[in-house]
Amino acid sequence: MRLDYSPDIKVIRVPCTGKVDVIHILHALEKGADGVYLVGCLEGDCHFLHGNLLAKKRVQRARAILESIGMEGDRVRMYNLSSGEAPQFAQYAREMDERIRELGPNPIKPGLSSAA
Amino acid sequence: MIVAEQKPIQEIIEEIRGDHSVLILGCNECVTVCEAGGKKEVAVLASALRMHFMQQGEQKQIEERTLERQCDQEYLEELRDDIDRYDSVLSLACGAGIQFTAEKYHATPVYPGVNTKFIGVTEERGYWTERCQACGQCVLAQTGGICPVSRCAKRLFNGPCGGSTQGKCEINPELDCAWQLIIDRLKSLNQLEAYEVLAPIKDWSTDRDGGPRNVVREDVES
């Protein structure tokens, strides 16, 4: 199954989305990522019981923090699917890519390049 | 433990707006447990502030550090060699820690990053409730281990008042009536006779009403 999605997306594998904390999301954005999205198992279907629900809360928290500092919360999102849904994975990747392109580049990028 | 809550980020931004180099200073004790000012909260806040100022085109140096305690001289002393590098310190400790840091380093402004709320407990993660108001003269032996000072809205000592309805307080239907809890607890301890004893007028001079307090222990003084 060869499915297309943007080559700009960097996939970082974690044992469970419950491993991802708010600080990981913020650090990715602080290093210049235009957006961050988590893809977890379907709600109610977490191998570690509720890791994906913890991740959902952390995504909400990260979004609230971004809004509070004047950045678009929509740069951070959470998606859920089962591991057998490769077409859905690619679909979410394309959807996130479109959303981020609509929002434009990470607004801290000019500051990052001048600090470098 | 002392329970605190992080201030709104916009308030924090205003506090440090004029400073170029800022140290976000966490505390490993109570504020770590109530997830308001520990190492993780320091990292999240510092990252958010760096991004905020970067998108404003302001180059600020925002660094992170967490001390074992900010209410102890020996741990605060660890900052001695570095403090001059910063225009200000944003402390995420409780009000005591913030003040002790400020007392220790006179030449550096120390700003609060949290609002200190109360002495309380973790009911469950993300939910903390008040248990003690440090009145200085504990009456828990007479009240079945439930404090009428911190848990009764009127601080009644011979309660309950007429606002107690079906075990709840009149100020909030979600709030247990402290005196209902006390009576239930005395019953289960088979000590209900304690409820019949009139509590004498409390000496509030040991509370904050007597002015700032201190404790002196000559036996442990160095």
Image: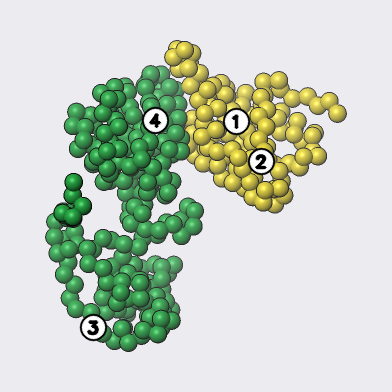
Chain colours: A yellow, B green
Q: Which residue is mark 2?
A: A16
N-terminal of the pair, mark 3 or mark 4, is 4
In this rendering, the answer to whether B17 lies above or below B178 is above
Task: Kindly report the distance in space between the C-alpha atoms of the residues bearing marks 3 and 4.
Answer: 54 Å
The reply to whether residue B133 is visible in this rendering is yes
- Type of amino acid at the residue the image marks with label 1: Val
Within 10 Å of disc 4 (Cα), the crowding (few <14, some 14-19, many 20+) is some
Q: Which mark is residue B64?
A: 4
Q: Is residue B198 left or right of residue B61?
A: left
Relative image position of residue B13 (x, y in whole percent)? 35, 32
Q: Report whether mark 3 lies on the same chain as mark 2.
A: no
Question: Residue at left 26%, top 68%?
Answer: B138
User: Which residue was labeled with disc 1?
Assistant: A36
> Amino acid under label 2?
Cys
Disc 2 packing (10 Å; few <14; some 14–19; many ≥20):
some
The subunit carrying tag 4 is B
- Residue A109 horizontal/vertical position (percent): 50, 18
Q: Nearer the viewer, residue A88 or B123?
A: B123
Q: What residue did someone put label 3 on?
A: B198
Nearer the observer: mark 2 or 1; the answer is 2
The residue mark sitting in front, 4 or 1, is 4
3 vs 1, front mark: 3
How many residues crowd around disc 1 within 10 Å: few (fewer than 14), some, or many (20 or more)?
Answer: many
Categorize mark 3 by other alpha carbons within 10 Å: few (<14), some (14-19), many (20+).
few
Quadrant in which residue B70 is drawn: top left
Residue A34 position by quadrant: top right
User: Is residue B218 toward the left or the right of residue B97 in the image?
Assistant: left
Going by the numbered disc 3, the residue's amino acid type is Leu
Pick the front one: B218 or B72? B218
Residue B130: give x, y in percent of width and height. 36, 60
The three-letter amino acid code for the residue at tag 4 is: Glu
Q: Are marks 3 and 4 on the same chain?
A: yes
